[in-house]
Image (cartoon, rainbow, N blue to C red):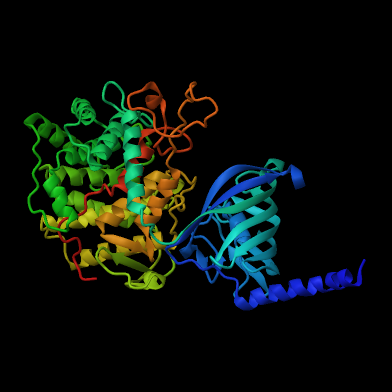
Amino acid sequence: MTRLAALLLSTLPFCLALGAAEAADRGVSWRIGRSDFLRYERTKVTGTGAQEKHSGETIVTVHGHDLSEGQYSPAAPVIDDLKHMLALRLTHAGALACPVKFDWHPQQTTNLRVKGDVRITESGQRIVKLEGRYTFKSRGKASRRDRWWFDSGSATTEVEFDQKDGVIQRARVDIRYTREDTKKSGPQAIRTSHGVYELRLKQLTRARPKDFQEQVDVAIDRGLKHLRRLQKDDGTFKPQAGYKVGTTALAVLTLTACGVPREDPQVSKALDWLFQQTPVKTYDLATSLLAVDRAYTPAKELKAIAGGHTVEKRVRDLPAKRMAWVRRTAAALEKNASSPGSWGYPPGGRSLLKFDTSNTQYAVLGLRAATYMGYEVREQTWLGVIRHFGVVLERKGPKGTVSLVRRGQAVPDESQAHLLNLRKVPRVAGFRYSTLESHNHVDAALNCAAISCLLIARHQLQVMQSRKWNAKLAKEVDEMIAIGWAWVQANWRVDRHPRHPSGGWYYYFLYSLERAGLLDGIKRVGGSDWYFEGAMQLLARQTPDPEKKADPEKKGEPEEKGPFEEGSEEAKASKGGAWNHKGRDETPPTCFALLFLKRGTTPLSTPITGDKR
């Protein structure tokens, strides 16, 4: 070995350490705004060295508001987020090494105590490399809602940070742990897991892209084409869980909300079928009224409401027989209540559940639509709605704040948007599914449903000039709405359904968020642009158009991708343009996604608040 080579080798560790120190001096921290977001592709790594294979692609979204002091810590977490949290952590700005110690409580899992350190190992002109080592285990006893208890766990990470963009480009985590299912006993309750995962940055979006609305319009157009393909020869749409009437009505509502006229052959055929039915279930009754009202709403009225104008008189040009059907259906829906303002499944469905928040919200939406078609809902029904949500609201919760930016209000500084219009709330609490102990969970869709129903009930009592609508009740309702928004803000996520026990009903959640946001005139929640963030998730999740069959005369040329010719057999079988739940091509997910993107909920057109706030 030459003396020069020996000298270079001997100084290499010093140079690496010096480069790392320089990186620390410059600071290693995320540089994305609260409204920016990153989309990572996560794959599971099997094999070693040259034999490594990557499989199991999953999309992981990181928003600017998920970062606190440079540390990634998502709200409403689940245990699967642990690997992302550890892989995407950085040292504090200006530190060569950073000790890690925090408690973390993911959904259905005991409190985890995480310890370790992150250190800079190498620094180039643009890329800084870091390594992390962690251990974690459960701290304390499992609560009634916790399913998993961790005996022990450890992880090592490798991170590549891009100093120019201020983001992590690539991260790799090797994680292993042993956990126990608290709902089981014996050897089968113990699970040992080990996996190596790699995250690679696929997309960096800073605020709204210039072509954002164009992307949304294209997605709506593709979604409508797919929804049309789901209609059957008798006019109905592919049902979900036996709700043939409700699913067909939901499709009609979606088509008409997206601008398809009532005279359209497919809409007309579906309406003809609906008017021949006698709905019984709460969902069927309510969605039928929503569909008919939207189909017969004049374009002038929609334009006036969208412009913020008051509509004193609503006109629905319904034929006499159809108007009679509407009155019968609305009366049946109001009568279906287990008590005024509370609805559940009809007898024989879930006998122990006399009422629940999901059925109640649909009933409220349906009755609101019925009032626009001339049906008079009783005062005690609207008062009962307020009483219902007072009953299902959690009694305990920490004190907190909520920041809501309303329509028309300016946001002068993006970084401070989450502090605008800050308001204290007595507690951050959620609205439960029901009061039955086995069905009293809280999730984001239920909170948004509660907010929407309280807004509608308040609006209707004001419109009918109810004598029972007084300052005391107005303050009570206003406080419940603020508490609901504070819960939504504290658990803010749009890449999943926050706090849902199984993580399901994602598109239903987004539709619930859309209703609450439009009915209350909200543009941002805790600084987060709910529509932009939700829309970007839907754009990413829409199924692509399938590949066209190769033309035999064009040998050697690559197959094209794109939509099939309308009306062809391939088009009818195509799933391109859909939004699917767990891979199932059903009607509701696509409807919910389209209603969100189109902002399909009709805003309230008269003053919606009884006090000044």
Decide if residue 449 is in sight here. no
Quarter of the image for the C terminus: give it.
bottom left
Judge from the rendering whether residue 87 lies leftward or rightward of residue 314; answer left or right: right
Residue furthest to the right: 1
Quarter of the image for the N terminus: give it.
bottom right
Decide if residue 34 is in sight here. yes
Of residues 319 and 598, the one drawn nearer to the viewer in this rendering: 598
Q: Residue at 40% of width from left, 64% of height from top?
A: 428
Of residues 241 and 267, the one drawn nearer to the viewer in this rendering: 267
| Whether residue 413 is situated above or below residue 198 in the rendered picture | below
Q: Residue at 84% of width from left, 69% of height from top?
A: 9
Query: Horizontal and vertical percent for residue 453?
Result: 27, 52
Judge from the rendering whether residue 605 lies leftward or rightward of residue 206; answer left or right: left
Total numbered labels placed on residues in the image:
0
Of residues 577 and 80, the one drawn nearer to the viewer in this rendering: 577
Query: Horizontal and vertical percent for residue 140?
Result: 63, 62
Q: Choose top left, top right, bottom left or bottom right for residue 463.
A: bottom left
Query: Horizontal and vertical percent for residue 579?
Result: 41, 39
Q: Choose top left, top right, bottom left or bottom right for residue 328.
A: top left
Of residues 496 and 613, the one drawn nearer to the viewer in this rendering: 496
Q: Choose top left, top right, bottom left or bottom right for residue 424.
A: bottom left
Q: Residue at 24% of width from left, 65% of height from top?
A: 408
Query: Horizontal and vertical percent for residue 85?
Result: 59, 59
